[in-house]
Amino acid sequence: MEWLNSLEAVLKIYWIIAGTASLIFVIQMIMTFIGMDSHDGLNADFDGDTSMDGPFQFFSLRNLVNFFLGFGWGGVCFYNTFEAKIWVSLCAVITGILFVLLFFLLIKALLKLNKDNTFHIENTLNQTADVYLAIPAEKSGKGIIQISVKGSVHEIAALTNQEKIATGAKVHVVEIIDNQTVLVTKI
């Protein structure tokens, strides 16, 4: 504590903000990892609509902590860089805003991992595919098609009501026969 007391008043404030915000950030991180982060814990007692679509809210305890984390450490890091302390304050504010934006971008990237990309054969209906293994004529046997669904290529058994469809031909899925087979027509 003697070290902290020996600092200039403004630098001492930056260190206190950085330390406090870091402690709260670590507590929030631990709570997130053990599953206690379902809400920010703030019940604001004012009228106003601060809700936004999605999980990112501009006014939240988490964003306030992120801002002060960047502000405090920005002030500490830039304190000896500039002679005029107004530039230190400006850099600290910019660093705080960048921390909030960085958090937003991380959350946005993590939410992309939450998408359901499970393959459902119903998604192949009315799609175009390539014949991988020739499809025998008039439902006399199954062939294989390759079809792209949600950015992923799948191989599916296929039947046709037409003449034999050769390997490499383009086909159109017109009906779902069962969970593993579709009916196609040649394009």
Image (cartoon, rainbow, N blue to C red):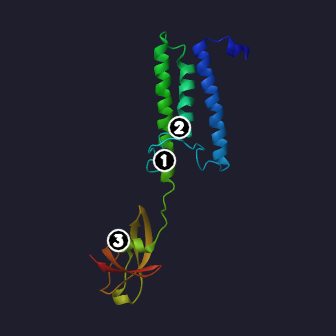
Viewer-closest of 78 and 132 = 78
- Quadrant in the picture for the C terminus: bottom left
Indicate the position of residue 160 as horizontal and vertical percent values: 34, 84
Q: CA distance from mark 2 to mark 1?
A: 17 Å
Looking at the rendered structure, the kind of residue marked 2 is: Asn
On screen, residue 103 above or below 186: above
Looking at the rendered structure, the kind of residue marked 1 is: Ala
Indicate the position of residue 55 as horizontal and vertical percent values: 49, 49
Residue at the spot 39% in from the left edge and 69% down from the top edge: 147
Disc nearest the viewer among 1 and 3: 1
- For label 3, the residue is 129
Residue at the spot 45% in from the left edge and 43% down from the top edge: 48
Asked whether the residues under the numbered discs 2 and 1 touch, taking CB atoms below 8 Å apart as contact, a structural biologist would say no
Residue at the spot 54% in from the left edge and 41% down from the top edge: 45
Label 1 sits on a secondary structure element that is: helix
Disc nearest the viewer among 2 and 1: 2
Disc nearest the viewer among 2 and 3: 2
- For label 1, the residue is 109
Q: Which image quadrant is residue 167 in?
A: bottom left
Label 1 crowd bin: few (<14), some (14–19), many (20+), radius 10 Å: few
Mark 1 or mark 3, earlier in chain? 1
- Quadrant in the picture for the N terminus: top right
Label 3 sits on a secondary structure element that is: strand
Indicate the position of residue 29 as horizontal and vertical percent values: 63, 41
- For label 2, the residue is 63
Label 2 crowd bin: few (<14), some (14–19), many (20+), radius 10 Å: many
